[in-house]
Image (cartoon, helix red, strand yellow):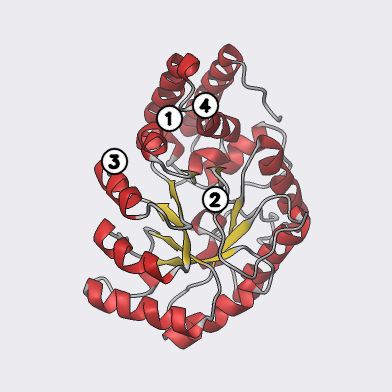
Amino acid sequence: MSLQNNSPSTLPHGFIPVMLTPFLDSGEVDYAGLSQLTEFYLESGAAGLFANCLSSEMYELTETERLAVTKQVVDQVGGRVPVVATGTFGGPMFHQADFIKRIYDTGIQAVIATTCQLALPEDSDAIFLDHLHQLMNLTGTIPLGLYECPVPYKRLISSQLLANILPTGRIIYHKDTSLDADEVAKRLAVAEGYQFGLYDAYMVNAVSSLKAGAAGLSCIQGNYVPELIVWLCDNFDQAGRQDAVKRVQQWLVDSMDLLHTAYPIAAKYALQKRGLPISLYTRRAVDPLTPAIQQQLDALLESADQLQDEIGIERVL
């Protein structure tokens, strides 16, 4: 049955990948590669998809490309899982509201508002809230999410702010980048009873966030080893699997720095090695993927394969 995108609803528990955008070596969007990548996420067990996000190089896409990429993902998924996508890219609230409406019309379940685009770094929380409420008033009943995107700067949403926002009933998704287990627990406490899901991006706190009540994980590690992230979401609270849970959590801690190096080129390299025919081309200015980094990634991915074999996690590719 096709998912409806005309009223707020709770997104499913589990892993919601922050999708990459494949490009051709010419620099154009590789829509064929995007199609294969979308199926890869789904076959890995993703509960939903986050298209047009920072990992997608959303700031380097044109407005037309943002809409086209998101529309392709929605059409291909065909209601199998919900899709969300970023809809705020700066400027006056009426301008941002217009794009929110346009990207929502692609068929996504919710439009994600990046907190850094709703106020300047020096603006108070009161100004941020005023702008957010303006945006809500300009966008009818469109379900929204919040993303503490670190570019161009990171604006965190405290539990106190969240408590102010949630009674509107409009916020159903939050991508958390606070890196603070205590703050995550506080946010989850004030969110109790609302149609709202917190998805942690910080894998050092993956298990603690899930045990505190997070709806799932939404992290870049899923662009390397999505099966591990899906398995963790499914098994974090299984009494008989806590030793394996600890091993997966430790692998995520140990790999944190490397998997953020030369990203997203490094993730595309890892997916290439797994058999996905996508280019390493990226429009973002990131650190180069040196031979030394490639060797480290090769060893790390081999350790992930070994871990999955020992636990009994089936790989897609």
Where does label 3 land, which residue? Answer: 181
Q: Earlier in the sequence, mark 4 or mark 2?
A: 2
x, y percent for residue 304: 54, 22
As helix, strand or loop, the secondary structure at mark 3 comes to: helix
Q: Residues within 10 Å of mark 4 (few under 14, many from 20)?
A: some
Which amino acid type corresponds to the residue marked 3 in the rendered image?
Ala
C-alpha distance separating marks 3 and 4: 19 Å
As helix, strand or loop, the secondary structure at mark 2 comes to: loop
Can residue 152 be seen from the camera position used here? yes
Where does label 2 land, which residue? Answer: 18
Please tell me which residue lies in front, 75 or 299: 75
x, y percent for residue 252: 43, 30
Which amino acid type corresponds to the residue marked 4 in the rendered image?
Asn
Depicted 220 relative to depicted 69: above or below: above
Identify the disc placed on residue 25. none
What residue is at 54 percent from the left and 50 percent from the top?
18
Where does label 1 land, which residue? Answer: 252
Depicted 156 relative to depicted 182: above or below: below
C-alpha distance separating marks 2 and 3: 21 Å
Residue 317, located in which quarter of the rendered image? Answer: top right
